[in-house]
């Protein structure tokens, strides 16, 4: 019954936060308006590191979360 097509992911509350390298890559992609790279970084993190998905151990074009679109991204840089 749960609709996985519409979902809010709160990466800040993840057991495994973005690494420094992932954060740098995400910042660079956002600064360069590289939307495809932003989506790829978020999909990979959602697949491998988001708490509810701990059973996933691989990410590829055929396996994992693949978003149709992202409505918004809100980042608080600390």
Image (tube, grey):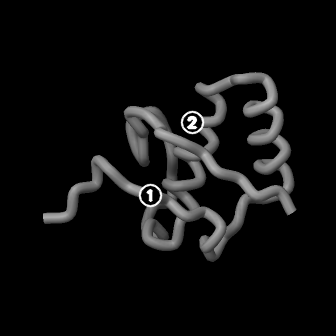
Q: Secondary structure at mark 2?
A: helix
As displayed, is residue 35 above or below residue 44?
A: above
2 or 1: tag closer to the N-terminus: 1
State the image coordinates of residue 22 (x, y, percent, origin top left): 77, 49
As displayed, is residue 3 above or below residue 43?
A: below
Who's the residue at 28% across and 47% down the image?
Answer: 5
Is 5 displayed left or right of 62 in the figure?
A: left
Q: Secondary structure at mark 1?
A: loop
State the image coordinates of residue 24 (x, y, percent, origin top left): 85, 44
State the image coordinates of residue 2 (x, y, percent, origin top left): 20, 63
Q: Quadrant of residue 14?
A: bottom right
As displayed, is residue 3 above or below residue 34?
A: below
Residue at mark 2 to residue at mark 1: CA–CA distance: 14 Å
As displayed, is residue 16 above or below residue 9?
A: below
Give the residue pinned by disc 1. Answer: 8
State the image coordinates of residue 73 (x, y, percent, origin top left): 60, 45
Task: Report crowding for label 1: few under 14, some 14 to 19, many 20 or more residues within 10 A (C-alpha).
Answer: few
Give the residue pinned by disc 2. Answer: 39
Who's the residue at 42% across and 47% down the image?
Answer: 64
Who's the residue at 13% across and 65% down the image?
Answer: 1
Residue 65 marker:
none
Task: Look at the image and tell me in which quarter the C terminus lies.
Answer: bottom right
Is 27 displayed left or right of 17 in the figure?
A: right
Q: Comparing marks 2 and 1, which lies closer to the viewer? A: 1
């Amino acid at each position: 019954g749960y609709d996985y097509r519409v979902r809010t992911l709160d990466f800040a509350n993840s057991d495994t936060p973005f690494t420094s390298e992932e954060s740098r890559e995400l910042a660079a992609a956002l600064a360069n308006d590289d939307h495809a790279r932003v989506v790829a970084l978020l999909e990979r993190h959602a697949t491998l590191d988001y708490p509810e998905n701990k059973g996933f151990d691989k990410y590829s074009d055929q396996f994992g979360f693949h978003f149709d679109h992202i409505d918004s991204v809100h980042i608080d840089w600390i």
